[in-house]
Image (cartoon, grey):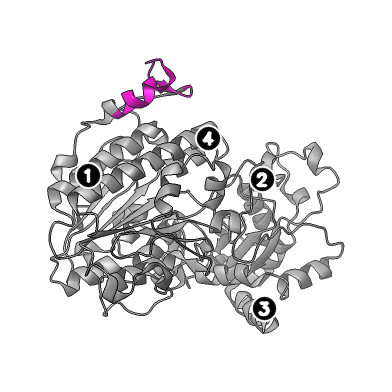
Amino acid sequence: MVALLAAGGGGYWWFQGRDTEHKKRVEIVASCDVPLPVLERLQNGYYPRRSGDILAAEQLPHQFGTRHSTPYPYTQDVPIFLYGPGYINPSTTSDRPVTVADLAPTFAELLQFDEFPERDGRVLEEALLPEEERNGVPRLIFTLVWDGGGDNVLAEWPDSWPHLKRLMSRGTSYSEATVGSTPSITPSVHATMGTGAFPSSHGLPDTRIRVKGNRVVDAWENSSPRYLKLETLGDLWDAANGNTPLVGMLARDNWHLGMIGHGAYLPEGDSDIAVMDQLGGVEFRTNPVYYTLPEYLLGLDGLQEAIDSVDIRDGEGDQSWLGNPLLPFDGRIRETPAWSIYQSQKIVQLLTHEGFGADDMPDLFYTNYKSTDLVGHSFNMIEPEERDTLEEQDRQLTFIVKQLNKLVGRKNYVLALTADHGQTPYPMVTGGWAIETPDMTADIEKRFDKVTPNKPLVLSNRGYQIMLDPEEVKKNDIEPADVAAFVRNYRIGDNVTPSNQVLKRFEGRTDERLFLTALTPEELEDALACARSQAG
C-alpha cells in the first residue's frame, strides 16, 4: 500500500467529510481550522504581483492528477542528508524540523563566509562538527538533488536505495525535513536551495509567474536569471573572492539554475558553468550570455555504453527496458536508468577537467538527477520504472562518492543530498478526485465573466493558484475574494466532465468540497494571524 502521506511536520493531515450548509463551509475554510503549517507554506510561496490572486489548497485526498505542488507532507517531506568526514557529524539523526532553505546558510558556515546575509534558512547545527574539529574549510561542497525523490517515494520503494542508507550511517540525516513552501515545484524549490530563502523573498513562486500585470511567463524565460530577486550563495561567494571559486551545475533544465544563481548577469559576476539538457533532444545546452558550457561535454560519448549496460540486465539485448525503448537519439532516454549512468560520467568529466576541489579555494557544484521526477510523471511513482530508476540513482551515489574521494580527497569535501518534492500516486490509489482545472476555469468564467466573455477573466489557473486579469475584474465589478469563495465551495459535482465521470467510489460523494481553502493574499494574512493566535 502506498504511503500517501508520510509522517512529518504536524503528522498526518487527512481532511475529509462533508459540510451541509454553505455558511458553515465558508466559516470553516476562513477560520483557524486550516492547519498553521498549511497557511505558512502558502505564505512562504507567495510573492506579490507574481503569484496568483487566489491561493488554494486542495481537500485531501482530492488532487490535480499526479501533480506534486501541495502544502501536505506527501509532497513536502524530503530527505536532507549531509556527508563529509572532517566536517559532518557521523551517524547522527536529528528530528528537528528543518527545510531546504537551511542548506545555503549551512554551506556558508562551512565556508566560514560571514558575509552571507540572514534569510529564511538557518544553519543545520546538528550536522556540523565543532569548528575547531573540522578539517579547515572544505575544498568542494557538492549538492545532489534527486528530483521528485521525496520521502513518500523512498517509502514506496524501501529496498531501492541501500547505498544511501549505508552512507547515512556515516553522516547526518534530518527526519523532519520539508520543502517549507508551496507550490512545491522545481524552479521555486531549487532557488530556495541556492538562496537560503523562500519564494516570498527570492521571487520565483512557480514554474510560470506573472510580470507587468497581465503577462504570464516561464520563471526562467530564455534561461535568463532576471526574475530571481536574490543573489545565491554561489553569486555572493564568487563575488567575495574575485570570481576565483568555481561554481557549476549540471542538471536537466533552466528551472534548476536557481541553485547556482545569476552568473554574468550580475555586474560583479562571471560566466559560471551551467550545463542543461536540450529539451526533446539528448545534447547539452546553456545560455552563453550568462553561463558557460564546456565544449568537451558536447557529443554523446558514453551514452550508448550506458544504454547497453541497462539493456542487457534482463538477459536480452533488445534495445528495451521494462518494455520501453532505449534509443540514444530520443530525449525520453532520460526516463530510463541509462541517463543517470551517463550523467554521472559527465559530472566526473566536468569536475576533473575544470579542477573542482583541486586547490585551497573552495568550490560549489550542484547537480539534479531528474529521471525520478520524469518517470513519475510519464509512468507513476508506484510503477516498476520508478523503482528501477531510483535504484540506478542510488548506485550512482556510490560512484560519485568514490570519484570525489579520488579527485578531491576523502576529508576535503562535503556532499549534501536532498529532493525538491515528493510525488503523487494515481487518483485510483489515493481514492481522490482528479481535479480538472480546464473545467474549473470554464466554470469560473461562466460564473463571473458577464461583460466580455470573449476575453478571459482567468489569466492562469494552476489549481493551487489562480491569476485574474485586473481589467476584467474591474469590468465585471467583482473582487478576487468573490472568486476565492467560489473555489472554496467548488465540489466534485461541479467538476464532472466527459473525461472525468462519477465512478462508483464517488457515488453519494458529489457534494464533497474539492478545496480545503482558497484565499486572497489579504485573507491569507488574516487566517495566519488567527491560526497563530490559536496556537499560542
- Identity of the amino acid at label 4? Phe
Which label's residue is closer to the chain start, 3 or 2? 2
Is residue 403 depicted above or below 326 in this figure? below
- Indicate the position of residue 380 as horizontal and vertical percent values: 55, 38
- The residues tagged by marks 2 and 4 sit, at their Cα atoms, a distance apart of 16 Å
- The residues tagged by marks 3 and 1 sit, at their Cα atoms, a distance apart of 49 Å
Residue visible at 24% across and 50% down in the picture? 404
Is residue 378 depicted above or below 508 in this figure? above
**Residue 285 visible in the displayed image:** no
Magenta span covers which residues? 306-323
Comparing 19 with 371, the one in front is 371
Determine if the magenta segment contains residue 480: no
- Identity of the amino acid at label 1? Val
Circle 4 is placed at which residue position?
379
Left or right of residue 337: residue 287: left
Determine if the magenta segment contains residue 313: yes
Comparing 496 with 473, the one in front is 496
Using the image, tell me which numbered label, if any, was put on residue 348: 1
- The residues tagged by marks 2 and 1 sit, at their Cα atoms, a distance apart of 42 Å
Using the image, tell me which numbered label, if any, was put on residue 434: 2
- Identity of the amino acid at label 3? Ala
Q: Mark 2 vs mark 1: give the one in front.
A: 1
Residue visible at 59% across and 58% down in the picture? 73
Q: Mark 3 vs mark 1: give the one in front.
A: 1
- Identity of the amino acid at label 2? Ala
**Residue 435 visible in the displayed image:** yes
- Indicate the position of residue 136 as horizontal and vertical percent values: 21, 70
